[in-house]
Image (cartoon, rainbow, N blue to C red):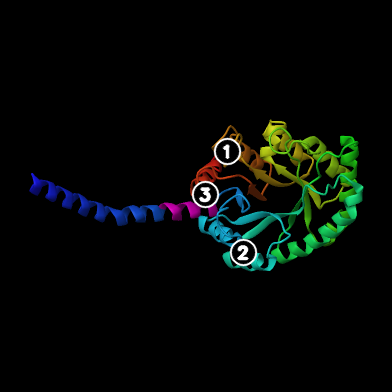
Amino acid sequence: MRSHRRTFLQSTLAGAAALAPMAFAGAQDDASQLRETLKSTKTKFAVNIEMWFTGLPFLDRIRKTAELGFPAIEMWPFQNRDIEAIAVLTQELGLSVAQFTAWGFRPGMNEVQNHDLLEKTVREACDVAKTLNCKLACVVAGDDVSGMTQEEMHDNVILGLKRVAPIAEDHDLTLILEPMNIRVDHKGHCLYGSAPAIRICEEVGSSHVKINWDLYHMHITEGDLCGHLREGMQAKQIGYLQLADHPGRNEPGTGEIHYNRVLKEAHMLGYRGFVGLECNPLKDELTAARRVAAADVW
């Protein structure tokens, strides 16, 4: 019995040892195939490196994005970032910087007293964009201001954007205004939904002020993603798309949004810019990347 058992164990271990390189090779082939898929998807995706690979140093997140096969990154505020290092690394890796945040939640653009700082910051963002060879910069309207109506706040946003639009035009940088959702993530924010964002951009009337059309926020706020996408494209006010599934704000395929249909609609409408992956990978980045690739199939 012992002799038979010893023989069985030896043959089993030998078989496992023989299969291990094959399994490793299969994993390598799978990763290689995923990279090629992500390089050739109909939709061009940009990984948000503030939400992906968060356990790594910032520059290593960029390297990991390239390893997966994505063509671009996006990031949040440019302040306190080594812009030169980011520019050199993305160029070395052949990655684009799809967009970054030029103006955040606070202080609010919806208060005129902040417009001097807004102008100064946009001028700085133009220099950053030139270094990064980036054409888009996100701007945020601001949270509700006590004693001020929503219309008054939106009018102040229009004033602020009218002031900085000529600067953006001179530097060929498009400012993308992002409506949020106030049900889940940004309660008390002054701008939500597509209609008021379109109105603001139409009032500003600049080719370099458009909307950061975050499909996650739009889904929670108003639904009918494809119908509103058509309206936004017809109004010529969509400057950039972002996505996340709901609930959970994870990658496509983890929630209720049928992103295959939504991305198909965007493609059919003629959108060819990057789509930002502003989502938290549910399990890990490799699994999330596979789900992103699967969402581009139609």
Q: Which label sits in the foreground, 2 or 3?
A: 3
Q: Is residue 235 left or right of residue 281?
A: right
The stretch of residues the image draws in magenta is 30-39
Instruction: Look at the numbered disc 1 and give the secondary structure of its residue.
Output: helix
- Which residue, given by chain and number where applicable, does mark 1 sit on? 260
Identify the amino acid type marked 1: Asn
Residue 14 falls in which quadrant of the image?
bottom left
Alpha-carbon span between mark 2 and mark 1:
29 Å
Residue 10 picture location, percent across and down = 17, 52
Q: Is residue 105 left or right of residue 32?
A: right
Q: Residues within 10 Å of mark 2 (few under 14, many from 20)?
A: many
Residue 245 falls in which quadrant of the image?
top right
Asked if the stretch drawn in magenta spans residue 267, the answer is no
The residue sitting at 82% across, 51% down in the picture is 207
Q: Is residue 26 left or right of residue 271?
A: left
Q: Quadrant of the N terminus?
A: top left
Q: Nearer the viewer, residue 268 or 21?
A: 21
Question: Residue 285: which disc?
Answer: 3
Q: Earlier in the sequence, mark 3 or mark 1?
A: 1
Instruction: Look at the numbered disc 3 and give the secondary structure of its residue.
Output: helix
Identify the amino acid type marked 3: Glu
- Which residue, given by chain and number where applicable, does mark 2 sit on? 90
